[in-house]
Image (spheres, grey):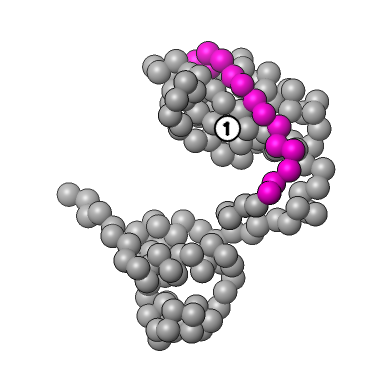
Amino acid sequence: MQRVFQLDDMDRRLLALLREDARTPTAALARALQVARMTVVERLKRLEKAGIVAGYTVRLSEDALRGRMKVHALLRADPKRGEAVVQALHAISQVRAVFAISGIFDYMALIEAETTGEIDVVLDAIGSIDGVEGTQSAIVLSTKFDRH
């Protein structure tokens, strides 16, 4: 039987600090949490082992992303083909993430591309995936804030 991992208040506060800046040194995290540095080190190991912390990443600035277009594509899929649809989406390099969602659509794909022409090609490719029954897309005009 698999044990369910329970986050406590300190875990949540530690994760919030890491979401703000994953490069924060453990000593600074310990000061912010008012605990010993080794407490932070052990909690991080535990969170990593449990799969709660899946990795540390780089967030690119808007300047670095300037010129890249972002699109949210909503997809309706044949329920019997859902897994195959997700695998096909994973194979498209411009698809950055896919979420299962509630409502009249089944999935939301986040797409990044250089040009509207590239977006058109990607959306055509998505529409031609066996099991995709319909799509609706929206181009992101600007990001007001992003906590990722």
Query: Which residue in the structure is indicated by mark 1?
Result: 109
Q: Magenta stretch? A: 131-144
Q: Residue at x 44, y 70 (%)?
A: 14
Of helix, strand and loop, which one carries label 1? strand
- Residue situated furthest front in the rendering: 144
Q: Nearer the viewer, residue 122 or 10?
A: 10
Asked if residue 101 can be seen in this view, the reply is: yes
Query: Is residue 12 left or right of 140 when viewed as pictured?
Result: left
* Rendering coords of residue 25 (x, y %): 55, 78
Query: Is residue 88 left or right of 101 when viewed as pictured?
Result: right
Q: Quadrant of the C terminus?
A: bottom right
Q: Residue at x 47, y 21 (%)?
A: 104
Q: Residue at x 73, y 23 (%)?
A: 121
Q: Is residue 34 above or below residue 53?
A: below
Q: Is residue 1 magenta?
A: no
- Location of residue 114 by image quarter: top right
- Residue situated furthest left in the rendering: 1
* Rendering coords of residue 78 (x, y %): 44, 15
* Rendering coords of residue 113 (x, y %): 74, 36
* Rendering coords of residue 131 (x, y %): 50, 15
What amino acid is labelled 1 in the image? Ala
Q: Residue at x 45, y 25 (%)?
A: 103
- Location of residue 48 by image quarter: bottom left
Q: Is residue 132 magenta?
A: yes
Mark 1: few/some/many CA within 10 Å (<14, 14-19, 20+)? many
Q: Nearer the viewer, residue 55 or 59?
A: 59
